[in-house]
Amino acid sequence: MGLEKISKNVLLKGGTIVDPYHNKTYKADIWLKNGDIFDIGNFDIPSSSDIIDCTGKVVTHGFCDLHVHFREPGREDKETIKTGSIAGMAGGFTRVCVMPNTNPPLDSPESVNFIMKKAQECPIHIHPIGAVTKGQDGRNLTEMGLMYQEGAVAFSDDGIPIQDGAMMRIALEYSKLIDVPVINHAEDECLRAEGVMNEGKISTRLGLPGNPDLAESSMVHRDLELADFTGAKIHVPHVSSAKAVDLIRKMKQQNDNVTAEVTPHHIFFNEEDLITYDTNLKVAPPIRSEIDRMALISAAKDGTIDCIATDHAPHTVEDKETTFDLASFGMIGLESCFGVVNKVLCKESNMNLIDLICLLTMQPRNLMGFDSDLFCKGSSAEITIIDAEEDWIFSKEHIKSKSINSPYIGKKLIGKIKYTISKSHIYKNS
Amino acid sequence: MLEQKHLLGLEGYPGKDIQTIIDTAFNFREVLDRPIKKVPSLQGVTIVNLFFENSTRTRISFELAQKRLSADTVNFSASSSSLKKGESFKDTSQNIEAMKIDAVVMRHPTPGSPKHLTNFIDSVIINAGDGTHEHPTQAILDMMSLYEKFGKLKGLRIGIVGDIMHSRVALSNIHGLKTMGAKVTLCGPPNLIPEHINDLGVSYSNNLDEVIEWADALNVLRIQKERMGRGLVPSTREYRSFFGITSDRIKNHKKEIVIMHPGPMNRGVEIDGSVADGDQTIILDQVLNGVASRMSILYLLCGGKTVEGV
């Protein structure tokens, strides 16, 4: 159980290989030598090999998450790059992008370099996303070019929407120098006001200040227009509303530089789940209505949404075990991700497994410009082995993050990660 | 006796229990008219009044109700508390319960906080107002007062006038009155009416004169002066002209209408002084019924088995 260095020869035997890059599903064994893919086919067992029985399991690319918060530097009590990596492996992730809203924020080449150094010691691939503005102040552009050279793969003031339209325009125009996406947490702060949950019939009943869906959609509209005008790449994070989905779908018909992600929680829960004032469901943007949830599921199926991103946001017990107004926004999501999205999209909404796997592997890699031909001979193995049919109840023991702020505890999920292989390490789930 | 251990709100609260509380309250109302206004019903019961937000009348009303029932009471208010020293809500409540208490009456600015408190302590919890969510004891005393006046709740037509959006009184009244079979129409500036209020089974009108013609009684909410001229309400005279219960307006309607107000009133803003002091109001009955209602609630939730000893 847990993380181990991988043996010299490993045979992944008898599994069903799902290769999103070649859009193929077939039965074969994968032979790993020193953590690299040596061959794929049917082999006689070399006597010195470790054999992992993959019968009945899906063997696919390691998952890639474009949106996680590993809290380092500054809040190492909530998560570190190391503990976040283990949480990622437990959830089948071999590659993640960490958001820059740390303390201090990732707003300089030096801070990007700090993450790159830390990342070297970790068993998964970690890419920093740099801040768009210095100190996330929404006014002064960071040294995006130098940060890119140090390893930043995209730019975002995540958590703090860029309110000033002219600033957003400058950021998009400047990003063309390095041709990477700008990610804006799309919310009009004036319309959001003090809102702590979706504005709707449930917020009215609970007496909690509401955040209307148009706080998101009006900002998404602005950002899409600016991206189209400037010709820059824009990625819309954690889309939460039907209105925003419609705008993205429409813009995608004329512009290939627009991409979008959805979180597992926005397609699993709806606002009715907040009726108990569970602070673990306090997230930004908020969990919205059933109509919005259905629109997000349709968008994931028809290609409007390009990828699943967890927005893994660890918080201490104290930050969550308080009254709803004071509780921090966010939930953890790496360990539960596959069981959630497989249940909602494949089991309840008839999506094909390979299409879901594309949203977790090839598509996020493509939109960031990462290599997505992972079953190529000689490449360093990034592999996830899944039992896609297993029913299980998510519980605290499945959480490997430093924080436990998950509303999935006690919920039935379908599909479980068995093994994750990355950077010559193997992680085994119990 | 009552189905639920706590009184957190009136949403989904059983109608038969609301009726039991009101019926019992009328028994206690008689006690309040006696020369010696005290009964031994809750002797040995300890109740903490946990007020994280300023309150005068609700706190005094609860305190009096507790004293009339011979309960032991302790008052805690946020200004004098260790909360200012950074102690958490959880620690404060657990510390107080560790001192062996039976019930907590809590007011708190955050919606849902009484429910949150149930996660930490085992005592009976009575919500004395949680932000913009509910104020169930106020709604019960309002219903008791209507019952006293009309002898029934079913079929009554009640207008609630004012800032519905920021009112816990409105939400509890809506739930309670709907459960008891009354009809409710809300009236106020459109930007102070929640978008989704229709889902609660009430009507809305922005024409106060129409509502006066329709209603048997009006519950007039306080319009907070802080909201005046700050975007939500343009000015006092604008508000009065559309939503003020002025003496001219009442005179123009040649009908009997009962006027209620949960207090504290802004005379000359949402209601004229002459109307507030007039014959058609039951505002001071509400205050007295507030003590009786709270006696009833405390008695039924904190160990009262029968109405003997009253």
Image (tube, coloured by chain):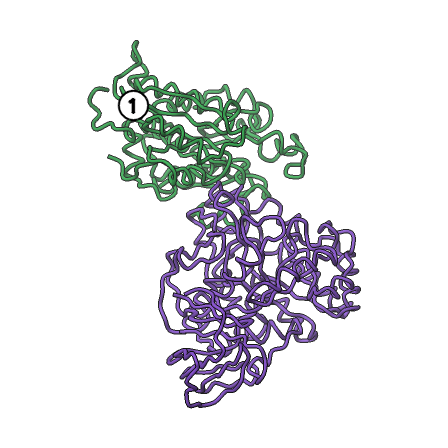
Chain colours: A purple, B green
Rendered view: A56 above or below B262: below
Q: Residue at x 63, y 77 (%)?
A: A371
Q: Quadrant of the N terminus of chain A?
A: bottom left
Q: Quadrant of the C terminus of chain A?
A: bottom left
SS for tag 1? loop
**Image height of B16 relative to A68, above or below:** above
- Seen from the viewer's position, the closer of residues B168 and B176 is B168
| Depth order, front residue of A80/A218 | A80
Q: Nearer the viewer, residue A189 or B183?
A: A189
What residue did someone put label 1 on? B45
Q: Nearer the viewer, residue B103 or B35?
A: B103
Query: What amino acid does circle 1 point to?
Result: Val
Outermost residue to the front: A48
Residue B114, located in which quarter of the rendered image? top left
Query: In this view of the protein, can residue A127 be seen by the observer?
Result: yes
Q: Quadrant of residue A250?
A: bottom right
Q: Which residue is at 35% across, 68% downward? A: A391
Q: Is A53 drawn above or below residue A287 in the view shown?
A: below
Q: Residues within 10 Å of mark 1 (few under 14, many from 20)?
A: some
Q: Picture coordinates of residue A98 (x, y %)?
A: 62, 60
User: Residue A89: x percent and y percent?
Assistant: 50, 66
| x and y percentages locating residue A287 in the rendered image | 51, 56
Question: How many circles with numbers are drawn on the protein?
Answer: 1
Q: Chain of mark 1?
A: B
Is residue A199 shown to the viewer in this render? no
> Residue B285: where, in percent of width, then height?
40, 22
Q: Quadrant of residue B140?
A: top left
